[in-house]
Amino acid sequence: MENLLEVKNLRLYYHTSKGAVKALDDVSFSLKEGETLGLVGESGCGKTTTGVALLKMPSPPGRIEKGSQIIIDGTDIVPLSDKEIRKNIRWEKISMVFQGAMNCLTPVYTIGRQMLETLNEHRMMEEKQAVELIKEYLGHVGLPPEVMNRYPHELSGGMKQRVVIASALFLKPRLVILDEPTTALDVIVQAQIINLLKELKKTFNLSFIFITHDLALEAEVSDRICVMYAGKIAELGTNAQIYGKEPLHPYTQKLLQATPLLHKKVDTLAFIPGTPPDLINPPTGCRFNPRCHCTMEKCFTEEPPLIEVEPGHQVACWRCVK
Amino acid sequence: MSQFMEFWNEFKRDKSGLVGLGILILCILLVVFEPLIIPYKEAGTKWRSIEYWQDNSQSAPPVWTNLFTKTKQAASADLRDFSKTVDADGNTIYQFHYNYQYDLAPYDLIIRAVGTGTIPLTVSVMRPDKQVIELFSTSLYNLSENEPIRISILNSSRDSALSFVREFESEENFGNIQTMSAGVTEIIFSEAKPGFVQNQIPLKGNYIFEIKVSQPIAEEGQEIPKVYFEEPHISVVGRVSGLLGTDNSKRDIFSGIIAGLKWALLIGFFTSIISVFVGVIYGIITAYFGGKVDSAMMFFWDYFISLPVLPILIVAAAIFKPSIWTLVGVLIVFSWAGSVKTVRSIALQIKEETFVEAARALGASHGRIIFRHMAPILIPYSFASMALAVPGAIIYESTVSLLGLGDTTVVTWGQILNDAYQGQAMLTGLWWWIIPPGLAIAIIGMTFAFLGFALDRILHPKLQTR
Amino acid sequence: MSEVLLEVKNLKKHFVPHLTLAQTLAGGKKRVIKAVDGVSFSIMKGEIFGLIGESGSGKTTTGKLIMKLIEPTSGTITFDGEDVTFTNKAKTQEYRRKVQMIFQDPYASMNPRFKIRDVLLEPLIIHKMHGNRAEQIERVLKALTEVKLTPPEEFLVRYPHMLSGGQRQRTATARTLILNPKMLVADEPVSMIDLSTRAEILHMMKEVQRDLGLTYLYITHDLSTARYFTDRIAVMYLGRIVEMGPADEIIDNPIHPYTQALIAAVPEPQAGKVDIIKKLPISGEIPSPANIPSGCRFHTRCPYATEACANNPEPELMDAGNGHFHACARWKEIPKAQ
């Protein structure tokens, strides 16, 4: 399989009056066609920022720094102008389902009208044709065509999320970034949406980047898991490498131990003391060192590189360096 | 004390707050030292007295406009320093020095004093070129005790001025001049040479005005009557006057502005604070209790806000003596309703916040929730509407004054503006009559706004809008 | 652990929204939203009782009814042997001292203009406890120490926005503990908190419960934390309890098809599930509480429903042994979940 997406040394800094917030610092990963990559981590670890960076639309004062590469289908999009990105990349090659997008539908317009607008932004199309296309995609996400004439408040949360997913698929993108697509939904609806996504992925031969804080959910969705901490990748491995046996990075280990399990009664759950670091002045050495339970001397002086410990399994921890 | 210091240290960092505080302190100082600052001490109480202002020039621009013009115009002045001598015949001579350094002569010079009985009076001027003009000679008869004396040179010295001209002009020229309305003061303050009336060249230098009060001649068998003549001074009616000029009723605008400051502060403070306070509490209560209470209170409010203000004001003015206090009272009664609707809508939102529910779960009373939890959130809005209510109240006061319902015993900025409007200051270009009161209203409004926002920033450092 | 602390009997809360003018003119009938529609359960002293349900199930409304934040339409609430359903002001105040609430969003539950000191003093001021201000501050410091916010003095002058999510929830817990309550109602206390600290908060709440002998009503949509945290669970669907019993029993041997569906839908952090499309026994979404189906209210979505389920009167909670109650008429015919 070809690499659909390759991210190399991605740096995204927010330049504030207090200094540069290193929201993403040297993030590299790749994504094969038809693959789902999961991004997990606590809030503020850079999951969403990565997604937004891939669309090249960081919110000001954020800036993608020099030396970063985002290669999609063989083209590096970092040097491209905004116009080119809008024309050829955004929604054409990569689209995104933003967190809470389902609550951002305008209450005063019908669903159809709002979807038409999204479509017209990108393609000039006869109205009739466009309506047909919308109906087709509503069908793909399991909604009847009448939904076009409904207003957002008449739909349930799950239906709204389906509408948002349909809107992201219109222009046949190759890669869809899903940012917490099921967070606000009930567990049964969440399972329905996850099933839908899996089906859509097959139908349209899509690749996903699935962003969530829920490790359990990630296990059911993603082929490969990328655990992020403080703007860096802590551990990146296949589903089996992360969930099948003990993961290698202490952060991943603790996160998993902190996840309550439904079918296993435990007396105490693990937790990680403290809070994620300030990204203007991150701790020297490993950024996780103030919260880590198994630090060595080296952890405080030198930043651990992301090294491959076994095929397809990368970890940034001094403990794993032989 | 340490708490205050802490507060002050925070406050110091807020630039706009400091500006606001600075202006407010300045305003208070101006009010306290008003008698020392204003040139017309009784401006506040005698604003509508024609006599009090009669020695001033009408619609004169501010003095400092001379800085921007080539021909310097004579400024108004009051000559009060004199030397008093008694000559051999028992006549009393008062000498006034006037250093004239302008290009355009003043409109008029007015001799003022108080006197009793019969006073024979001669006034003359010695010009820098040593020419002496006897301006007039007259006798004032049977003045009652301490009656004010007022003699305008413009009116009394026309003949003497003309005879002064005659000395220099040819007969032919003089005939022309007579028909012309050559000003007396222009003749006095110009270089004396042929043709000087047509082509006036100002004669700059020190002029000495002399008021001679003659010893009256005793009638037979009677004592020499005692001449009582006190407090002589000469008002120079200039072409430019005071810091901010004069209006068309000869009133000094600077004095009016300073005298009006205290009323502006008073109207602004009382109406805005009380009405906003009442409005905010009313709005919160109606939103908080909702249901029937809300319906009843909003019905009352609807009724209130649709009442025609003006007829009620006229009736009120007819019943009560129009005074600034009645006015403030009426303004409060009619302006509290303004903020209710907005407050109610904000309060309806706050009411749904979890922390209000949390307070209720803790067992907090209605009063505590309203005053401790909801009202403080509305402080920024309250300060903003207070700041905005200040100029509104001042303008409202002037509107009321327009209908003759204002307090005529005081001077307010609104009244000055209103007079300017009536006097068509805009059309006649009397900008010094409009801009200062307008600017003063704006500055006071701004001061309140600056202070309000600064206080809010300090007392409530981070206003999270969720 | 056999004494009943709180007992709720046939509790109902029906909301009747006002019609708009247009609706009235069009001859619209008033809709009744049955948010809570006949809920009965009892909580033992020292127990952690979980109330589980999706959004729209009425679990939060039940919590508010128990907190007496809203008045029930009918039913009774008995606390410590005393009927507290409708009480006078003084009694309500006393009840509020004994039963405290922890909210979902600790940040939203604190006035953003209050310092932590004021937040924690508030309950003491309201209930006029612990004498003068200095003694009250003593109590505040003690409460902060109880929830492990140390050194407590440092937190007094901070504002809620200066704290981290975990610290905020600790503060919120401290506020409830300060009045020495007997019971805490916790509505989704950890759903807004990051995974890494979620366990820490739950652990802290458990410790406090053990140390002070508290009783909890834990309201959540999250079955996994419920299993970890609670002793007994009641599952709510459309304003009614459909299944109730010991936490382990409910999750390992669910009887009601709805509970089975809920459990099947919960994701688990295990490898090798990516290519599997999960079999969900039920489809669709929860109906509107303004339009509750007849008969068993779950029959519209139930895979095992028969005509009888729609027509027969609604099944009441039945005992299946071991304190396991359920409300499914066909329970014997339903296959056990794997």
Image (cartoon, coloured by chain):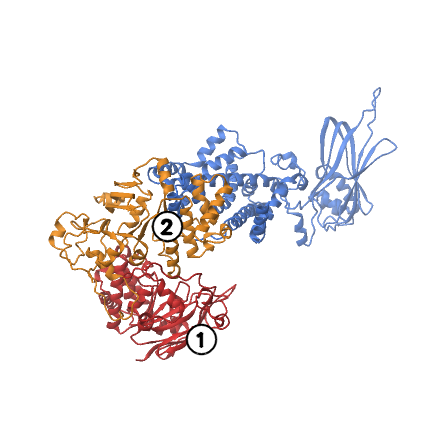
- Which lettered chain is shown in orange? C
Position of residue C282 in the picture relative to residue C207 (left or right): left
As drawn, the label of residue C209 is 2
Pick the residue in front: A63 or B63.
Answer: A63
The amino acid at mark 2 is Gln
* Furthest residue in direction left, as rendered: C307
The residue where tag 1 is placed is: A305
Q: Residue A311, relative to residue C259: is it above or below?
A: below
Q: How many marks?
A: 2
The amino acid at mark 1 is Pro
Q: Chain of mark 2?
A: C
Q: Identify the image quadrant of residue C270.
A: bottom left
Q: Position of residue C171 (x, y in %)?
A: 43, 51
Position of residue C157 in the picture relative to residue C281 (left or right): right
Q: Identify the image quadrant of residue B265.
A: top right
* Furthest residue in direction front, as rendered: C1
User: Residue at left 38%, top 77%?
Assistant: A309
Q: Colour of chain B?
A: blue
Pick the residue in front: B229 or C314.
Answer: C314
